[in-house]
Amino acid sequence: MKVYLNGQLVDKEKAVVSVFDHGLLYGDGVFEGIRAYNGRVFKLPEHLDRLFNSARAIMLEVPMSKKALEEAVIATLRANKLRDAYIRLVVTRGEGDLGLDPQKCEKATVFIITDKIALYPQEFYDKGLSVITSSVKRNISEALSPSIKSLNYLNNVLAKAEASRQNAPEAIMLNREGYVAECTGDNIFVVKENTLVTPPTWAGALEGITRNIVMDIARNKLKLLVKEEVFTPYHVYVGDEVFLTGTAAEVVPVTTVDGRMVGDGKPGKMTLKLMKEFRELTRLSGVPIYEGST
Ligand code: PMP
């Protein structure tokens, strides 16, 4: 396997960063999780825009243009002969000293890992997920905005660990006020009377690329009402349907929340439609990796 590291494609074993890299020492950096389907990178410009916004928010200078990063992603996929892949694009603050000061870090580290995608089990899509509400609150925006896709994921890791201990694949994270924010690596939607509701980003949700696509499909193709509104766990319990969205998960139904059955306990009608429409889009769009990928 070849990994892109600071301008070069190197063997996996040689893809190493310094122990003085502030990405490692302080979680000081930003990243994206991207997917390629059938020889095309899905929503690559949107992911690059979000990466640059995250970097800007933490005053990190990405040492490459969007165009150069796009080319590096494509080159890495080609080097690994991948058509369907998970892509991890990471920009860290780079090597510094043992102090916190990011100004001591001269140059950001950029690496891109491309690998076969570890898909969620089909059962999740057929039967739906069981999720729990985590006791770990989502980071408050005034401290570390959940809109920044930073390398500091300990908040999410702790919630995920709580879910794992209860055999749940995902956990709902609430914000400080007790409103639903998002899950550890996915956004959340509730369907009630033909209306889709998802928390606004200011309530502590990442502006998920999948979330945005699903809102667009729901509004413009399925002609559903879509609202960005805060809601509590109660509204999740009494929703007609609940589903999660994310690059890895795509659109995945939720059928149990904190031990309560959602709706009739089966993936909902809207969820199934959105799953289908989303899959269709992944097949038909994206930046081609190889010549002749149309
Ligand atoms: N929330 C969090 C905390 C995430 O890490 C992710 C995955 N990047 C998402 C939501 C979903 O975002 P996207 O659809 O862009 O993958």
Image (spheres, rainbow, N blue to C red):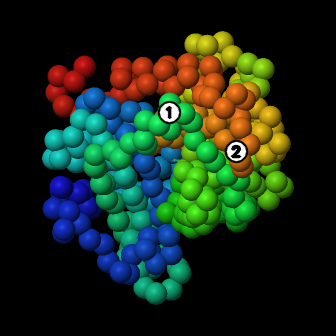
Q: Please state the horizontal and vertical placement of residue 47, each as a whole percent of the image.
A: 45, 42
Q: Which residue is mark 2?
A: 257
Q: Determine the residue located farthest toward the bottom in the rendered image.
A: 98
Label 2 SS: strand
Q: CA distance from mark 1 to mark 2?
A: 16 Å
- In primary-sequence order, the first of circles 1 and 2 is 1
Residue at 78%, 20% in the rendered image: 193
Residue at 54%, 28% in the rendered image: 213
Q: Please state the horizontal and vertical placement of residue 113, each as a whole percent of the image.
A: 30, 54
Q: Amino acid at mark 2?
A: Val
Q: Is residue 103 above or below residue 4?
A: below
Q: Which residue is mark 1?
A: 125
The quarter of the image holding the C terminus is: top left
Q: Is residue 261 above or below residue 101?
A: above
The part of the image, by quadrant, that contains residue 78 is top left
Q: Amino acid at mark 1?
A: Tyr
Label 1 SS: helix
